[in-house]
Image (cartoon, rainbow, N blue to C red):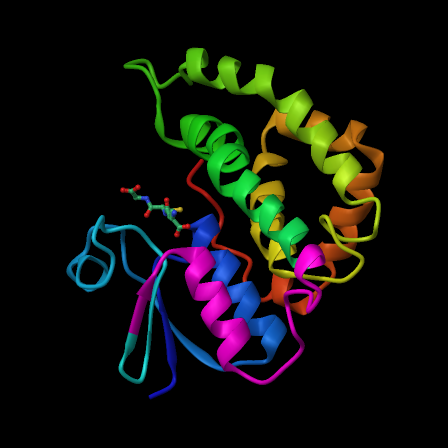
Amino acid sequence: MSLQIIGIPQSSFVRVVRMVAHEKGVDYELMPAMPHSDEVNAIHPLGKVPVMRHDHVELAESEVISRYIDDTFDGPALMPADPLAAAKVDQWISIITTAIDLTMIRHYVLEYLFNKDEDGNVVRNRIDDSVEKMPAQFAALNKAVAPGYLGSDAFTVADCFIAPILAYVSMFPEGQAQLESSTALKDYFARISERDSFKVTEPPPPPS
Ligand SMILES: N[C@@H](CCC(=O)N[C@@H](CS)C(=O)NCC(=O)O)C(=O)O
């Protein structure tokens, strides 16, 4: 069976694993499915996307899926061979999944898109909390791309994790302003945006 990636293409985490597959040159079938749908619940114990299926293998969690694809298929290695260099990349993946995703996607982008009051206006409290956290996170990312890629001198899985987040966060005013003033990160994101893996995984536009 070919690789199946299961989850809606609008999900930043689904985009991560799709970018990994494209970077490896692996064909896959995208099966759009909502979080908590039967297909997803069958694989992820908490119903989150992405999940994947490959022959008899079923896996959940974007980092695990990314590693499986990187380790299982031929194609360019997306993690450094050197253990310390790999640990630096892992460190960034962890920071992204435990902090940056929360600030920039869950408590900012999703708030702008889906949390409206009865008059249809955006609810500011959570957005404002996130906006306060953004300068430190953008500054850290701006510094971390100095070697050329995120925490590395070569393209890795960590770049697949941050690119979908930068794409979404820069669609909204405070995120866009932060990216504009983070010179190295802006240049880095412009380079990543030129990669085929980024272009072909572009999600459908968010609801207005
Ligand atoms: N730790 C998970 C997080 C995945 C995640 O939060 N996916 C979102 C969509 S971007 C989701 O399924 N949300 C539904 C939920 O949290 O119940 C991973 O890395 O795959």
Asked if residue 179 lies left or right of residue 109, the reply is right
Q: Indicate yes or no whether the magenta region holds residue 83.
A: yes
**Residue 44 position in % (x across, y down):** 25, 57
Q: Indicate yes or no whether the magenta region holds residue 74.
A: yes
Q: Residue at x 59, y 14 (%)?
A: 132
User: Which quadrant of the rendered structure holds the C terminus?
Assistant: top left
Based on the displayed image, in which of its 4 quarters is residue 180 positioned? top right
**Residue 130 position in % (x across, y down):** 52, 20
Asked if residue 150 lies left or right of residue 119, the reply is right
Q: In this view of the protein, which residue sits in the foreground, 88 or 127?
A: 88
Q: In this view of the protein, which residue sits in the foreground, 141 or 168?
A: 141
**Residue 50 position in % (x across, y down):** 36, 58
Q: In this view of the protein, which residue sits in the foreground, 207 or 23?
A: 23
Indicate whether 84 appears above or below 59: above
Asked if residue 182 lies left or right of residue 200, the reply is right
Q: Residue at x 62, y 42 (%)?
A: 166
Based on the displayed image, in which of its 4 quarters is residue 133 positioned? top right
Please provide the residue range marked out in magenta: 58-85
Q: In this view of the protein, which residue sits in the foreground, 106 or 70?
A: 70
**Residue 135 position in % (x across, y down):** 68, 21
User: Which quadrant of the rendered structure holds the N terminus?
Assistant: bottom left
